[in-house]
Image (tube, rainbow, N blue to C red):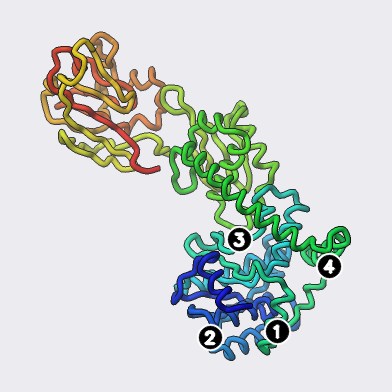
Amino acid sequence: MDIEQFNSILQERCRLLPGLPVVVGVSGGADSLCLLDLLARAPYPVTVAHFNHRLRPEAGRDAAAARAAAERLGVAFVAGDADVAGWAQAERRSLEEAARILRYRFLFEQARRLGAQAVAVGHTADDQVETVLMHLIQGSGLAGLTGMAYRSRSPWDEMIPLVRPLLGVWREETLAHCRERGLAFVTDASNHDLAYTRNRVRWQLIPELERYNPSVRQAIWRMAQVLAGEEEIVQEAVQSAWEACLAAEQPGCLTFDLERLRRLSHPLRRGVVRRAATRLLADGAARREVAFEDVERAAAFILAPSRSGQMDFVQGIRLVIAAGGKGKDYLLALGPGQAETGLVVDVWPQVDPGSVFSLSVPGVLDLGGGWKLTAELAEWAALEESVEVSVPGGEWEAWLDGDALTGPLVVRAARPGERFMPLGMGGRSMKLSDFWINEKLPRRARAGWPLVFSGEKAVWVPGFRPAHPFRVQAKTRRVVVLRMMRISS
C-alpha cells in the first residue's frame, strides 16, 4: 500500500493527530503485521499490544512473532493474557465473544496507561464483508448492515476511539505487503475451524455467493459504505429526537418527556429506546445483546403502558411511568440495580429545603441541577394599559408589579403551614400543601420546590402561578420579570 495514501486515511477517515501515540493490536497474522509496518513508518509513536487468549498450544509462538516484529521495527511492545475459556464458561459467553471482550479490555487498558489517542486494529475489507453478512443472517437493522467504521466510539472507553485503517484493503493485499516487506507472519489454525460462525461465512457462504456474483465481496463492501452514509442521516434524526425527549439524565436513570416520545414516529421512537439501553448498559457485550424484539416491546409500552406502569426491558433495565406536575407524565429508564424509591427526578427545579437565596433585580440565580432564575426590570408604559394581567411567557415566566414588592426577593422552599394567594382566586389564600395537591405535583418534588418571596410573602410559584396581590395592573408603572429556565439537560 502506498504510504501517502495510508497517511491520508489515518488523518481523514480515522482522524488521528500526527505525533500522538497509538496502541496497535497485533496478533502476529498478516493483517495486523501489515498495519503495524505501515503505522511504524507514519508520524505516530506506536506501541504493539499482543493478547494471548490461551486457547491454542501455538499461542506462545504468536506472541513471539508479535514481539519480534516490534523489535525489528523499533517500537514498544506490551503483552497480556487471560484464561478466555474459563472466563467464557463463568460468564456464559461463547468463546468468540469472550475472546473479543477480554482482548479489547486489555488493549484499552494499555491505551489509557500510555495516554494513547486511539487503539488501532487490522480489520480488512474482507472482515467488513464477513461482518455485514453475519449481521444480515442475525436479522440486523441498518446500523448492522453498515458493518464497521474507520473510527468508532468504543464501549471499553468513552474517550479513546477504536480505529480500523485497513477497512478498504483486501486480505490478499496485506499478504502481498508482508511478503514484499519480508514480514514473517503466523497463520492461526483456528481461522479454518468451521465451529466458528465467521469461518463458516468465510469458507462456505461467501464462495457460494460468488457462484451467483464473482464480485460479491466488492458489492457487499460498497453497499456497506453507502449504508454508512444513510445511517449518519438516521442518527442525526435520532439525536434530534433524543434531545427533544430527554428531560434529565442522572447516574443510572434517564428521564423522558412521555408525551414527546409518543409523538415521535415509530422508527425514531425505536432509535431513542435503543440509545437509552446503550447509555445504561456499561458492558459493551451487553449492549450488543439488545434485540429487535426487546426494543419493539419497549416502544409498545411507551404507547400503551401496563396497568402497573412498569416494564422489565432488557439486561436489568426497567421502564417506569412517573407522574409529573399538572398531569404531565415522564418515562424513567432505570439502569440495572437502580431503585425508583427516593429518586429525585431533576426535570423539576429543586433547592435545599433549609437554604435561602437572595435574588437581585436585575440578577441571575443558579439553583443547581441545570436550573437558573433570572430577574429583570421592564417599563409598563411599553405595554398595553388596558391589559389587566400579563403572563406572556407561560408557567415559567412571571410579570410582577414592582411597586407592590415590599422587600428584597428571596428564593427558598415552603415552610410548614405556609400560605399562598394564587392568581385567579380573587385574592383568597390557601395552604401551599393544598395548592400542591390541587396542581397534582408529585409528593417527592414538593419539599424542595423553589418559591420566590418578597419579604415573607410568596409572590410566585415557578411552573404554576404568580400571587394575586403582585399581579400586573393598568396602574402598574414598574414591572419585574422573573424567568425560570433550564441551562443544561
Per the rendering, the mark at residue 203 is 4
State if disc 4 and disc 3 touch (CB < 8 Å).
Answer: no
Per the rendering, the mark at residue 185 is 1
Instruction: Return the disc, 2 or 3, that comes first in the chain's sequence.
Output: 2
The residue lying toward the viewer, choosing from 296 and 377, is 377
- Residue at label 3? 149
Q: CA distance from mark 2 to mark 3?
A: 26 Å
State if disc 3 and disc 2 touch (CB < 8 Å).
Answer: no
Which image quarter: residue 149? bottom right
Q: Position of residue 349 (x, y in %)?
A: 34, 35
- Residue at label 2? 75
Amino acid under disc 1: Phe
The residue lying toward the viewer, choosing from 269 and 215, is 215
Amino acid under disc 4: Trp
The quadrant of the rendering that contains the C terminus is top left
Instruction: Return the disc, 1 or 4, that comes first in the chain's sequence.
Output: 1
